[in-house]
Amino acid sequence: MKTSVLYFVIPCYNEEEVLTETAKRLYAKCQQLIRAGKISASSHILFVNDGSSDSTWEIVRQLHRKNAIFSGLSLSRNRGHQNALLAGLMYAKDYCDISISMDADLQDDIGVVDEMIARYEGGKDIVYGVRNNRDTDSSFKRGTARAYYRTMNRLGVEMIPDCADFRLMSRRALTGLAEFKEVNLFLRGLVPMIGYPSDKVYYKREKRFAGTSKYPLKKMVSFALEGITSFSVKPIKMITNTGLLVFLASLVFLIWGIAQKVRGVTVPGWSSLIVSIWAIGGLILLSIGVIGEYIGKIYMEAKERPRFLIDQVLDSGECKVDGEIGLLR
Ligand code: UDP
Ligand code: MG
């Protein structure tokens, strides 16, 4: 049987502190898998440089020079994690049988890769790496993550809880993913929509090996909102329903007001008036905001701007499976 070509796809943004170690560990894993006949010797470790401003790309070039098993894509500028990952996957799909995407910071456990490949051999097209606990997260991150998954679920978005972007995808699944043309990218919601047979493997997520998180709170919040508005129109429906309720309530008040007038007991009513003005005003602004979010999305999608542009590609030469890569300590 022909062995499968595996591409590891690793998005990297300013990861100079951790990249050498990541490369070393991935290389060891590839060596082991190739020797065991699990994957083809023309497998690759593909780093996607997402417009880093440090020496990330220089390190990738050095690695590639040392051993062609390391290949690299460099995007024209920083486009964000999701776009960088997509760039790597879309590049890999023309060459690989299987892709495994993971973060550069060694939080994802390389140890479960064997299991992922075994599930693929067993006929699965997508194998999700799911964290079995959130011990390494702050309690704030844990709480918000849980609330988020619950909200997404209620909004009807099919997401795998506790699965970041550590997953195996077959070539067929990647070809399926390529059919989704949206610019507002939220891969965690998109991949389950592909629909081919899938499975999960569980792993313990470690702390970042070195360097700092490239996802500050602000980015995380906008990523979460992106997920909601990219996959669900329920917030708009909720606005319609709230609007309807408020309208009905105002009808009741109208009748009550007339009745009071007829009975001649109208009071100055300044406070209730001012409260309702603020309440309705707030509601209207909020509603316009939510609708604006969706219109903004339509605007971005209508422009059909490219999701990423590739500046440089390093992918040539012969992979060496034996021996050490001299550069790596
Ligand atoms: N990343 C990227 N572009 C960005 C931000 C992050 O390619 O604009 C990469 C980053 O190098 C890492 C992965 O996305 O490989 C996840 O980022 P990070 O580990 O900082 O996020 P966290 O684990 O803290 O949520
Ligand atoms: Mg991380």
Image: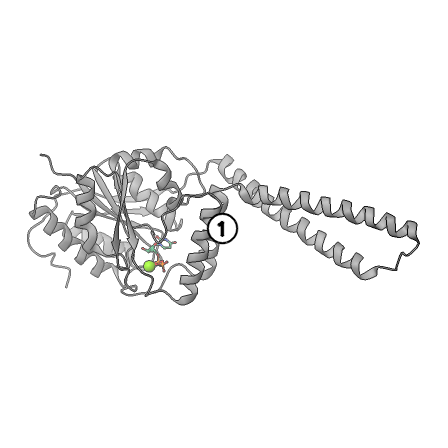
Residue 177 left/right relative to 300: left
Q: Give coordinates of residue 139: x percent, y percent.
A: 41, 67
Q: As displayed, is residue 284 above or below residue 181?
A: below
The C terminus, quarter of image: bottom left
Please name whichever residue, 42 or 236, is drawn nearer the observer in this view of the structure: 236
- Kindly tell me whether residue 59 is visible in this rendering: yes
Residue 111 left/right relative to 275: left
Q: Which residue is at a point 90% across and 51% down the rendered structure image?
A: 261
Q: Give coordinates of residue 289: x percent, y percent.
A: 61, 48
Residue farthest to the front?
A: 263
* Res 198 quadrant in image: top left
* Res 248 quadrant in image: top right
The N terminus, quarter of image: top left
Q: Which residue is at a point 7% across and 48% down the rendered structure image?
A: 35
- Mark 1 surroundings within 10 Å by alpha-carbon count, few (fewer than 14), some (14 through 19), many (20 or more): few
Please name whichever residue, 327 or 230, is drawn nearer the observer in this view of the structure: 230
For label 1, the residue is 225
- Kindly tell me whether residue 227 is visible in this rendering: no
Q: As displayed, is residue 114 above or below residue 133?
A: above
Please name whichever residue, 245 or 227, is drawn nearer the observer in this view of the structure: 245
